[in-house]
Amino acid sequence: MKERMQGSGSWLAVLGFGAAVAGAAWFGSRYSPRHPETRVWYDELNKPLFNPPDAVFPIVWTGLYTLIAVSGWRTWRSQNSRRRTWALCLWAMQLATNADWTRRFFGERQPKRALADVILLEALILRYIAVTTSVDRGAAACFVPYAAWVGFAAVLNSEIVRRNPEPPRPDAQDSIG
């Protein structure tokens, strides 16, 4: 199997995948609960007992984002094929969906919409694993902890939706009176 490991091109690819993941992380961080108004909203949510402490998230995501970048790079350096191309498309789609979840949940304060996003994200991750297994088993294995965490996040998001019904919209009240 011929791999793309020659010279600086491979290092540029590593940097490129790292930069893409860092960009997604940066995009998501713009909507994090660090912002005071978002913090108040998030603190007021009725969350389940299995909601991890805030300190867990940056630790987990640092590891997961590293694995996401390594997986993309390993897939890219694999022999050119249709499955490799499809795997790279799935990799890009899951990364965009990942970044968008934070905007939906924290930025827009729409846990129901975020739930749809995290379900789509999990489906993309699982499909990526399935496709990538035949391209590079190591790249696919890098996504297993990610799939587990996002599955947990989907359960957590679902429970937050269940515990926090949305209040009626102001325009709905206007039509009553």
Image (tube, rainbow, N blue to C red):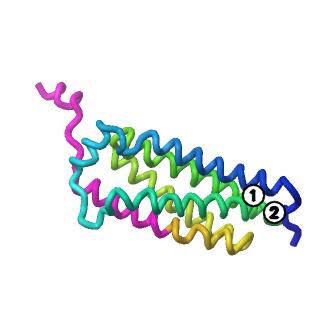
* Label 2 Cα crowd, 10 Å radius (few <14 / some 14-19 / many 20+): few
The Cα atoms of the two marked residues, 2 and 1, are separated by 6 Å
Residue drawn at 73 percent across, 63 percent down: 75
User: Few, some or many C-alpha atoms within 10 Å of disc 1 (few <14, some 14-19, many ≥20)?
Assistant: some
Position of 94 with respect to 132 (left or right) is: left
Q: Name the residue tied to disc 2.
A: 81
Q: Nearer the viewer, residue 170 or 20?
A: 20
The image shows residue 160 at horizontal and vertical percentages of: 28, 56
Residue 108 versus residue 171: which sits nearer the camera? 108
Query: Is the C terminus in the top left, top right, bottom left or bottom right quadrant?
Result: top left
Q: What residue is drawn where x is 30% and y is 62%?
A: 51
Magenta span has 163? yes
Magenta stretch bounds: 148-177
Relative placement, left or right, of 65 versus 53 is: right
Q: Is residue 154 above or below residue 21?
A: below
Q: Which mark is residue 85?
A: 1
Whether 170 is drawn above or below 71: the answer is above
Observer-nearest residue: 149 or 12?
A: 12
